[in-house]
Amino acid sequence: MSRSNPYKKKRRQTKSTVLIYGEGLTEEIFLKHLKQVYSKAGNIAVTIRKGRGGSVDNPVVNASRYLGDFDRRFVVIDDDRPRQEIMKAEKKAARQNITIFKNTPCIEATMLSILNNGKRYSQKSTSWCKKEFELSHVSQNKRGGLEERLECKKIFPKKLLDEQRKRNKILNGLILTMTKIKNANSVFPVSIKT
């Protein structure tokens, strides 16, 4: 009957690494909230960065240039741009092995869908979705700062996110990137759209 050496260090399991690049500040705040809720228990190191506007392919270019040996790279963009710009971004992403999550028409529409039991907002304009989200959930003077981060915790509790991920492909995909990345190539096509 031998005993194991209590001073012997256990081998650390290597973490999978993921980069998620959002189009702007709202995406960054929402993604960081998802990371805080879902990524703690997993064996995946998630890095979240935000873009600075410009064309729709800027987040793809920035994600591909971001230094680091990431196992997977993802980009979250709004689908409210001309079709040619979106296709250009998708081609760049495919060449760089980057998966795109497209919010139709914008991230606020995806968040409204989560909050309103899967209701679709793809026929609404971006400005309407932003206005509706601000009026119903986060006032404009709270957008972009610590207040919005705190509001995000209140209006998107884990229970709601767990319920709505069954109805929302984008939400489910984002949660999967933060929890299960082993077979990511089979789980995620090049582009995921709501």
Image (cartoon, helix red, strand yellow):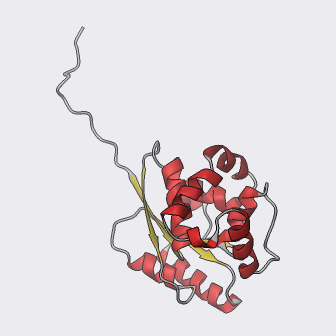
Residue at 50 percent across and 54 percent down: it is: 35
Q: Position of residue 124 (x, y in %)?
A: 80, 77
Which quadrant of the view contains residue 193? bottom right
Q: Position of residue 142 (x, y in %)?
A: 57, 68
Q: Is residue 25 above or below residue 86?
A: above
Question: Which residue is outermost to the top?
Answer: 1
Q: Position of residue 91 (x, y in %)?
A: 58, 83
Which residue is at the front of the view, 34 or 134?
A: 134
Q: In this view, does 194 lie above or below 1?
A: below
Side (left or right) of 101 relative to 83? left
Residue at 34 percent across and 66 percent down: it is: 69
Residue at 64 percent across and 65 percent down: it is: 138
Side (left or right) of 21 relative to 89? left
Query: Is residue 35 shown to the viewer in this render?
Result: yes
Which quadrant of the view contains residue 64? bottom left
Residue at 53 percent across and 76 percent down: it is: 24
Question: Which residue is outermost to the left?
Answer: 7
Q: In this view, does 13 lie above or below 101?
A: above
Which residue is at the front of the view, 10 or 112?
A: 112
Q: Is residue 79 above or below residue 138?
A: below
> For the image shown, how many numbered marks are present on the structure?
0
Q: Where is residue 83 in the image (x, y as percent from the top left)?
A: 70, 88
Side (left or right) of 90 relative to 111? left
Q: Quadrant of the C terminus?
A: bottom right
Query: Is residue 182 shown to the viewer in this render?
Result: no
